Structure formats: C-alpha cells, structure tokens
Amino acid sequence: MPIIKSAIKRVKQAQVRRERNVATKRTIKTAVKAFEAKPTSESLSKVHSELDKALKKNLLHKNTVARRKAAIAKKAKDSGVKLAAAKKATTAKKKPTTAKKPAAAKKPAAKKATAKKAAPKK
C-alpha cells in the first residue's frame, strides 16, 4: 500500500476506473452473447452501439472495434439479419419552403483613405 498521499489517491482512482471499464466490457459481452443466441436487427444494433460507446470512452482501440463489428456483421449476414436503418426522432415534418432566401447582405466596401496631411502652421 502506498504511503504518499498522491499515490493513495491514484490507487483509488485506478480502482474506480477499473470497475467502470469492466462494467462496459461486460455489457459488450452480454450484447454479443444475446446476438449470438438470437440474431435480430435489434440485438445487432445493440452490439454496434456498445462497441461504439467503448470506442468513445477510449476503452477499446478503433481497429479492435472495427474488427469486432466486422465479425458480428459477417455472422449477421450469414443468418440473414440486416441492420435496421436508424430512425430519426422527428414528430412533425417540415414543409418545404419554395421562397428563396435573401442573398447575404453585402458589407459596404471600405472607403479609400484619402486623408491629406495638413501642412504644419508656422
């Protein structure tokens, strides 16, 4: 056990981070097992989501995530599962506007400086 105060704090921080990382990896493993047990588009999407979260948190390297996603996608293709298109949460559709937007207001051109120096009075 460390004696120095900052080292004690580092040990505590490392423990908290380890628990968080183990929990994230566990969710990835359970999502993968759920997909392998019953391949559906929802479970495939869940696996991709969990892998992306791990990548965002710098828990896994981007190439590791890419490799795992490719392997899962191959299994999905073999079982005939396609990734469902992401649905956007738009409740009201916007009406297309036909009116043209006004052109960006042009800034007035800078006036040329024609200031003449006044002759000093003697």
Image: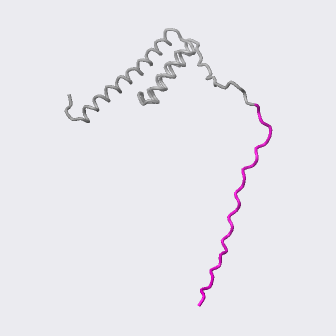
Range of magenta residues: 95-122
Image position of 50 (left or right of 84): left
Residue drawn where x is 43% and y is 16% of the image: 29
Counting from the top left corner in percent of width and height, residue 3 is at 19, 32
Residue under the image location 76 percent in, 44 percent down: 101
Q: Residue at x 47, y 26 (%)?
A: 53
Question: Would residue 7 appear left or right of 109 to someone viewing this image?
Answer: left
The quarter holding residue 81 reads: top right
Q: Is residue 61 magenta?
A: no
Residue 35, percent from left and from top: 50, 13
The quadrant of the rendering that contains the C terminus is bottom right
Closer to us: 110 or 119? 119
Above-or-below relation of 73 to 61: above
| Residue 114, picture quadrant | bottom right
Q: Residue furthest bottom?
A: 122
Farthest residue, direction right: 98
Q: Residue furthest front?
A: 122
Q: Main secondary structure of the magenta part?
A: loop
Residue that sits furthest to the top in the current view: 37
In depth, the one of 2 and 66 nearer the eye is: 2
Drawn side of residue 23 relative to residue 100, left or right: left
Residue 108 counted in the magenta span: yes
Q: Percent position (x, y) of residue 115?
A: 65, 75
- The type of colouring in the image is one colour
Q: Quadrant of residue 99?
A: top right
Q: Quadrant of the N terminus?
A: top left
Between 5 and 90, the residue placed more toward the observer is 5
